[in-house]
Amino acid sequence: MENEKIEMFELMKAQIEADKEEIAKMINVVKIQKSMIEERDEQIQKLSGVIETKDGELAAMTKNFNNQVKENKQMEQELALGKSQVADMTNRTAEAEKTISALELKAAIREKEAMEKERQTKALWASWERQKIKYEEERN
């Protein structure tokens, strides 16, 4: 029985040694996994920083885009107003040109009338001069 106890002790001792080796291997595996987890955590932190930076850039770009859209809308409104003003000025110019043409036509008619009256007046004056000369001759 003493032999059996020694054998049993030896078996248990061998089992403990095997368990120690197994535990040591497991500890190494856990250390490797911990190291890998820490590396991944560092990568995640770096990527989180990159994501935050990109989020900031995206927010700035979105704000810039929104400002450009707002400016474009304002410019479109100003352009529409300018087009409206140009159309109004074009209409006014056309009306002014019509008025000028009508005034020029009236002026031409009045000029012809004035020239005719001048011709008639000169003819009348010449006739009067002739009559005056004839009267003077008759009187003398």
Image (cartoon, rainbow, N blue to C red):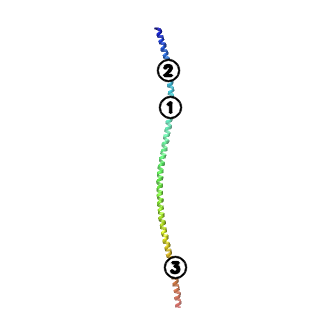
Check disc 3 and give the amino acid type: Arg
Mark 2 or mark 1, earlier in chain: 2
Label 3, residues with CA under 10 Å away: few <14, some 14-19, many ≥20: few
The residue under label 1 is: 40
Q: Secondary structure at mark 3?
A: helix
Q: Residue at x 50, y 20 (%)?
A: 22
Check disc 1 and give the amino acid type: Arg
Q: Are marks 2 and 1 in contact (CB under 8 Å)?
A: no
Residue, far top: 1
3 over 85 or under it: above or below: above
Q: Secondary structure at mark 1?
A: helix
Label 1, residues with CA under 10 Å away: few <14, some 14-19, many ≥20: few
Indicate the position of residue 15 as horizontal and vertical percent values: 48, 16
Q: How many marks?
A: 3
Indicate the position of residue 136 as horizontal and vertical percent values: 53, 89
Q: Residue at x 50, y 31 (%)?
A: 40
The residue under label 3 is: 119
Report the disc number at residue 87.
Answer: none
**Alpha carbon distance from label 2 to label 3:** 139 Å
60 over 29 or under it: above or below: below
Check disc 2 and give the amino acid type: Glu
Indicate the position of residue 106 as horizontal and vertical percent values: 48, 71
Q: Are marks 2 and 3 in contact (CB under 8 Å)?
A: no
**Alpha carbon distance from label 2 to label 1:** 27 Å
The residue under label 2 is: 22
**Alpha carbon distance from label 1 to label 3:** 113 Å
